[in-house]
Amino acid sequence: MSDEMVTLLKKIDAPYGRKLVLESVEHNSEMRLLRIRIREGSRFTVLDIDKDTAKLWSAAMTAWANEALH
């Protein structure tokens, strides 16, 4: 039996055929992480990050996207 509960948050089709999947992962220990799955062809990358890392990453991506609009 798995010690984690996974909830799909978002699927994103990115440029060049890449696929992104964001999932909320809650462990029996009550630890909660954001799982980021990146698929590039046959290659997969999976990152589990905490809320502080997610906030920093989100802020950096938002700042870049806002600058890219100008």
Image (tube, rainbow, N blue to C red):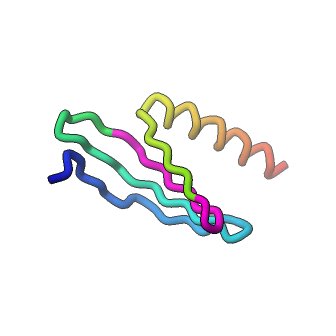
Can you name the residue that lies furthest to the front here? 42
Instruction: Return the residue nearer the eye: 11 or 1.
Output: 1
Instruction: Return the residue nearer the eye: 28 or 55.
Output: 28
What residue is drawn where x is 60% and y is 60%? 43
What residue is drawn where x is 45% and y is 61%? 10
Determine whether, in the image, residue 15 is placed left or right of residue 58.
right
Determine whether, in the image, residue 38 is placed left or right of residue 7.
right
What residue is drawn where x is 55% and y is 65%? 12
Q: Within the magenta stretch, is there residue 42?
A: yes
Instruction: Return the residue nearer the eye: 65 or 53.
Output: 53
Instruction: Give how far across and how far down residue 59 sits, in percent.
Output: 60, 36
Can you name the residue that lies furthest to the right here? 70
Q: Within the magenta stretch, is there residue 54?
A: no
Instruction: Give how far across and how far down residue 62 sits, in percent.
Output: 64, 43
Tally the numbered discs.
0
Instruction: Give how far across and how far down residue 60 sits, in percent.
Output: 65, 36
Instruction: Return the residue nearer the eye: 54 or 36.
Output: 36
Magenta segment's dominant SS is strand
Instruction: Give how far across and how far down residue 64 sits, in percent.
Output: 73, 42
Q: Quadrant of residue 40?
A: bottom right
What residue is drawn where x is 57% and y is 40%? 58
Can you name the residue that lies furthest to the top here? 52
Q: Magenta segment, which residues?
A: 33-43
